[in-house]
Amino acid sequence: MDRSGIEAVKARINISDIVRRYVDLKPVSGRWMGACPFHQETKPSMSVNDDEGFFYCFGCQASGDVIDFYGRINGLEFREALEHLAAECGVELSHVPHDPHAAERKARKQVLLDMHDEANQFFQRNLSLASGDHCRRYLANRGMTPEMIAKFGLGYSPEDWHGLDNFLRTKGRNPDLGVEAGLLSKNEKGNIYDRFRGRLTYPIQNLSGRVIAFGGRIITEGEPKYLNSSDTPIYKKGDHLYGLNLARSTMTRTKRAILTEGYMDVISLHQFGYTDSCGVLGTALTADQVKTLAGFCSRVDLVFDGDGAGRKAAMKSSRMILLQGVACKVVLMPDGEDVDSLLQTRGAEGFEACMNEAPDGLTFCMNTLREQYAPRDIMAWAKSFLSELSDASLRAFYLPRIASGLGLSEADFRRDAGAATPQQRNPRHQPRQTQRVEQQPGMGVGKDFADDRYFLRFSIQYPDYVPELAKRGMTQVLRTPWAQSLWKKLETTQQGQVTSLLNEQEKGFYIQCREEFRENVLSGRELLEEWNHICHTIALEQEKLDKRQLTEAIRQAQQSGDTERALQLLALKESRRRDDEQH
């Protein structure tokens, strides 16, 4: 993605204008403050800085620029968030490599979206006509209120092979395009007809609220009972969740998502006040869906039928969620009940009783493994789970819990799973930054000078000193690859544009430093003392480097048999030692 396009978007949009759509902001000391939408908060813990274009939460440390905020609050990837904002502010983005068909595909997708809007109008209108009487009765018998019918945009497709086809033709739509959109079907003879007939229709929306597909339930006799849109250029069922566009605002407040399977189950949950509910779309839960949910919440409550199929799905889904580092619970319905029937017969109290009895996801997996799996399968599951965790801290979190849950010795399980115990690790092989942070958990200005973040914090807060720090050899005091990478970006990038080059960890640290700078600005004598301290530390590190290089040069001279060269270097080393003693 062209960096100039990213900077152009950020230059045209005030971050406070975007944040204000979701958060009530108030001016405080030259910035905006509001309750953070990314954790359960009522007090103004989030700072929004228009001058530098970032947000920062003092509670959960969520941070980023306007593109990060928009993507996180809407569950979008960075590229998607950038494209949305670019379209909003009129910035033309250039992609590398250039795709000559991109504009054509974009225009075609827009036509397909428009056709879905037209189909949705057609279905909703039919529900209100005489032909939709039996569908309205069906909804009433299921306990659906008019408010819920309107909120989810339910409709009716009549028993007509060409009802929607003819309607779309009046809008100038080509039937073959209707087939591509998944609204019409074509048989082997080439005849085109309505895909949904005699069905209650459920519009499926993306996070922006655009209709991208439909689900349909048969009202009279017929098969299949449920019929869903197939994948199209604007819809892939494994990427979307039913009702998420309506549930996301509640999820960001409760930090919980209730995930179930049926369309009607989702609607009933919303009707009974569980507005952080959504559903999978006729397929097993996917990793992409979990990642999307993780952008809105920190816990997913899985709601499944209590039969064998439901338990199997709960086992697989729990594992997928836990691998993402997200907490979960498994809520199993009583025999013969689903979410909708339970709510309609026992109300919220009956559902809450099931929620209160629900085990957390890891406990459910451990119980299922012990009860239903052979020992070799249990160990295979546990080892596979640990191996798929990309985050070492998550492995450290889960390993003792899995060992305990399966009744295993933690030491034996660590060995069998290929994970060393803490005592077995060689501290010299640990990242230097990790060691120092553990020794000095609280870092203040002028303290913990051995920590890379101390030097980087000064560079970020006082960027005018960066060129001089580079000349003096700042790279000599930075020990970790992370710090070296961040320093290179600070050194070579113009101030104000560096955030576009930073990864998530770097950006979070950068913004935190800039926000702390507002609260504790050094000046005068304090700033001079800090500067002298940093320069002195860099000089000491340079001396250490010189000594190491001299020692290595002596060793190489001795190995090669160059006695004269070795004696010269030894004399130089002794001379420097005497100078150090005199000072």
Image (cartoon, grey):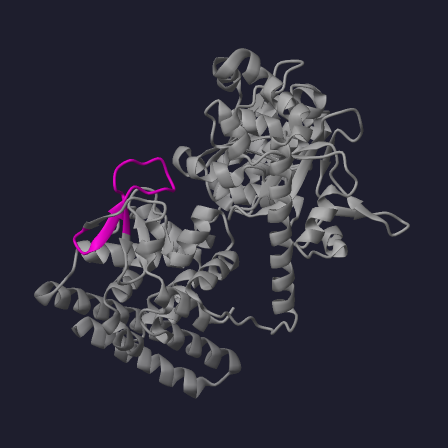
Q: Is residue 478 left or right of residue 576?
A: right
Q: Is residue 492 left or right of residue 576?
A: right
Residue 321: which quarter of the image? top right
Q: Residue at x 48, y 85 (%)?
A: 562
Residue 490: percent from the left, percent from the top? 35, 70
- The relative height of residue 371 versus residue 568 in the rendered view (above or below) is above
- The relative height of residue 487 versus residue 218 in the rendered view (above or below) is below
Can residue 496 be seen here?
yes
- The relative height of residue 359 versus residue 443 in the rendered view (above or below) is above
Quadrant placement of the C terminus: bottom left
Q: Residue at x 76, y 34 (%)?
A: 159
Q: How many numbered discs, if any?
A: 0
Residue 403: which quarter of the image? top right
Q: Residue at x 63, y 20 (%)?
A: 338
Residue 90: percent from the left, percent from the top? 44, 67
Please tell me whether residue 45 belongs to the stretch shown in magenta. yes
Q: Is residue 205 left or right of residue 47?
A: right
Can residue 406 be seen here?
no
Looking at the image, the residue that sits furthest to the right is 189
| Of the pair 126 and 580, the residue shown nearer to us | 126
- Write down the region rendered in magenta: 28-47
Dominant secondary structure of the residues highlighted in magenta in the image: loop
Please tell me whether residue 180 belongs to the stretch shown in magenta. no
